[in-house]
Image (cartoon, rainbow, N blue to C red):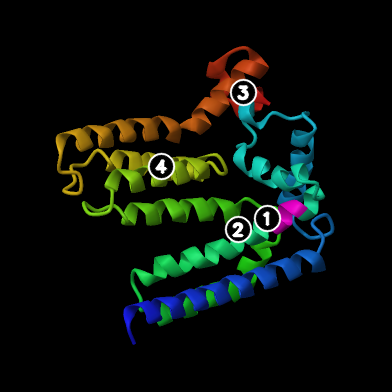
Amino acid sequence: MDQNTNRRQILRWLALVFLVSLVFRVLWVFLTESYSHVDGDSVCRLSATKAFVVGELDFFTSVHWLPLHFTILAIPSYLGVPLELGGRLLTAILGAGLCLLSYVWNRQFLSSRTAIVAALSFALWPQSIYLSSMALSEIPFVLFLLGGVLSLTRVSPSSRPLFWLYVSAILFTASNMIRFEGWLWSLVFSFALLVPSPHIPHTEKRDSWLRLALLWGLIAIYPLYSMMISAWKNQGDPTLFQDPKRIY
């Protein structure tokens, strides 16, 4: 079997994994309701997104929530799809995409066949289906986070290292804007970029690498900016972010 034939077979299997994962997630969306389901976080996020859409909440200056997940949930409503249904369907699509990323991750350690079986197992894992059918932040957060990690693994002298570093930076920044845990990941990797690497042999590329590390580090502490802005907006003193009760 030549390489092209093998690649086409893998792509067909991955398309099947994506289709199966998407079908199960969409079915669960239509078989359940967010507001009657036992998940307070999902209900809260949908309610907050409604307030965001009509302009009653500003997540970009709030210490309570990071803004990107609510922006994602709001996208279908701007296209005429009911907010609850649209937000859950979009999460289901992202969940199916996460199944494909799980193949890419497992393929680094396993054979193609085993990695496909692992991705299919993840696609059929009940907890994964549940999280992917609710308006929760875990699925997009892990999707962007894993995408950032996988982008870093593509960095090599022969594969446009700065390109993959920028892609990774964008994905990690997206995870920062969804959950506060992303802050820690990006901060660690921004410091990792300061370590000399044989993948960046030339001085000018090394300078670009260092500038990216500095930019990435500044973006990584966005939650701190958010808390200080919220404290300044609500209390008139940005230093009050150290006392969350006084910020609210």
Q: Magenta includes 11?
A: no
Regarding mark 1 in the picture, which secondary structure is present there?
A: helix
Which residue lies under the disc numbered 4?
169
Q: Residues within 10 Å of mark 3 (few under 14, many from 20)?
A: many
Q: Residues within 10 Å of mark 4 (few under 14, many from 20)?
A: many
Q: Give the foreground label among 4 and 3.
A: 4
Q: Of marks 2 and 4, which one's residue comes earlier in the chain?
A: 2
Magenta region, residue range: 86-90
Task: Please provide percent x and percent y for residue 176.
Answer: 50, 41
Relative to 147, does residue 13 appear above or below in the rendering? below
Q: CA gap, disc 1 to disc 4?
A: 23 Å
Q: Residues within 10 Å of mark 1 (few under 14, many from 20)?
A: many
Task: Please provide percent x and percent y for residue 226.
Answer: 56, 28
Relative to 135, does residue 114 appear above or below in the rendering? below
Regarding mark 3 in the picture, which secondary structure is present there?
A: helix
Residue contact between numbered discs 2 and 1, judged by CB atoms under 8 Å: yes
Q: Quadrant of the C terminus?
A: top right
Q: CA gap, disc 1 to disc 3?
A: 29 Å
Relative to 127, does residue 80 appear above or below in the rendering? above
Splitting the image into 4 quarters, where does residue 170 fall?
top left
Which residue lies under the disc numbered 2?
94
Residue at point 77%, 59% (across, down): 38
Which residue lies under the disc numbered 1?
90
Amino acid type, label 1? Leu
Residue contact between numbered discs 2 and 4, judged by CB atoms under 8 Å: no
Q: Residue furthest top?
A: 236
Residue at point 76%, 64% (across, down): 29
Residue 125 in view (yes/no): no
Which residue lies under the disc numbered 3?
230
Task: Please provide percent x and percent y for residue 172.
Answer: 45, 44
Regarding mark 4 in the picture, which secondary structure is present there?
A: helix
